[in-house]
Amino acid sequence: MSLLEQSWYQKGHWLSVLLLPLAALYWLIIFIRRQLFLLGVIRCYQLTKPVVIVGNISVGGTGKTPFTLWLCQQLQAKGIKPGIISRGYGANITEPLLVSPNSLASAVGDEPLLLARRSNCPVVVCPDRVAAGRALLALAEVDIILCDDGLQHYRLARDLEIVLVDAKRGFGNGLLLPAGPLREPRTRLAKVDLIIANSGAVSGADCMMQLQGSAARALLTGRELTPCSVTLVAGIGHPQRFALTAVQAGFTVVENRFFSDHHQFSAADFSGINGPVLMTEKDAVKCQHFASDDWYFLPVDASFSAKDTADILHRITTLLE
């Protein structure tokens, strides 16, 4: 974790204090921008199918990908056909691109590739979510559009906003970027439709999501790995949560190699590791083309109580009536 990220999760850290003037400028920019959309000065675009935003107000991982996969599975079980749009973070994308399970993570982004492989739903990536949504509707027959990480993309009109909050890290020092981890003030949460707490209680949350690891599988062969001593490798927003999941699954961690979120891995990142490597599924899609036989990934699945499941699905299926 960088010094900047460390300052976000410590009250009164000198670096956060130093960056307060920039955070104030950032607040002014996002306030003016949001008002321009609310007043209609900048146009919002409504797609012909309902749009559900899955996002957060803080940087770093909050569990959006496992939630989106869970939601796709739940909707498909009801005969509803969801489609997914995403920015394609880390890839050089200039126009809408349909993601296939055989796409390269460097070309479409790691999370969209994982979503395409696991969800059995059409996935389109483009920094312009409006263009992505239009392309999705032109390329596939869908009933509803799930927009991954598009809470601040106000050009795209939305019918429902779902925000995930990581219970372990919360909102850090509560400050806006770059003094803190927040993309928008916490007051923004009062205007969203559903707040989901990930792996613990969060004040004001409507539902609680739990993440559970399933059997670890080899990147190359798919064979399962029984719990043993491993080196953890991760390039995600909150690697400590992955480490906890690995321990809960019975693995003994002998070394951690944590990189920044969306890190573009190379074989050199794994030099000097003896024994099995265990990584996240999101990282595995970036490493498969140069993986060794003893590299494994740990899939993580979201789960909800029956009551929360019914509530979430009711809110979404109502959009289709």
Image: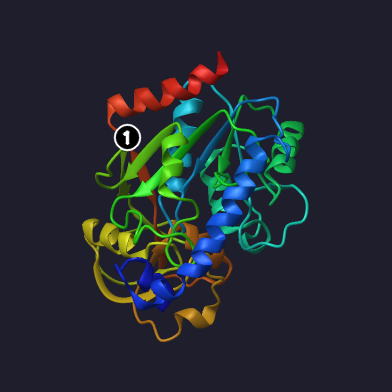
Pick the residue in front: 171 or 100. Answer: 171
Pick the residue in front: 313 or 15. Answer: 15
What residue is rendered at 38% in x and 82% in y? 273
User: Quick one: label 1, few (<14), some, or many (20+) residues within 10 Å?
Assistant: many
The residue under label 1 is which amino acid type?
Answer: Cys
Pick the residue in front: 293 or 129. Answer: 129
Q: Is residue 135 left or right of residue 301?
A: right
Q: Is residue 133 visible?
A: yes
Image coloring type:
rainbow
Pick the residue in front: 104 or 160. Answer: 160
What residue is rendered at 40% in x and 65% in y? 279
Placement of the C terminus among the 4 image quadrants: top right
User: Against 312, is 6 above or below?
Assistant: below
Measured as percent of width and height from the top left, residue 311 is found at 36, 24
What residue is rendered at 47% in x and 72% in y? 19
Measured as percent of width and height from the top left, residue 84 is found at 60, 39
Measured as percent of width and height from the top left, residue 99 is found at 67, 48
Q: Secondary structure at mark 1?
A: strand
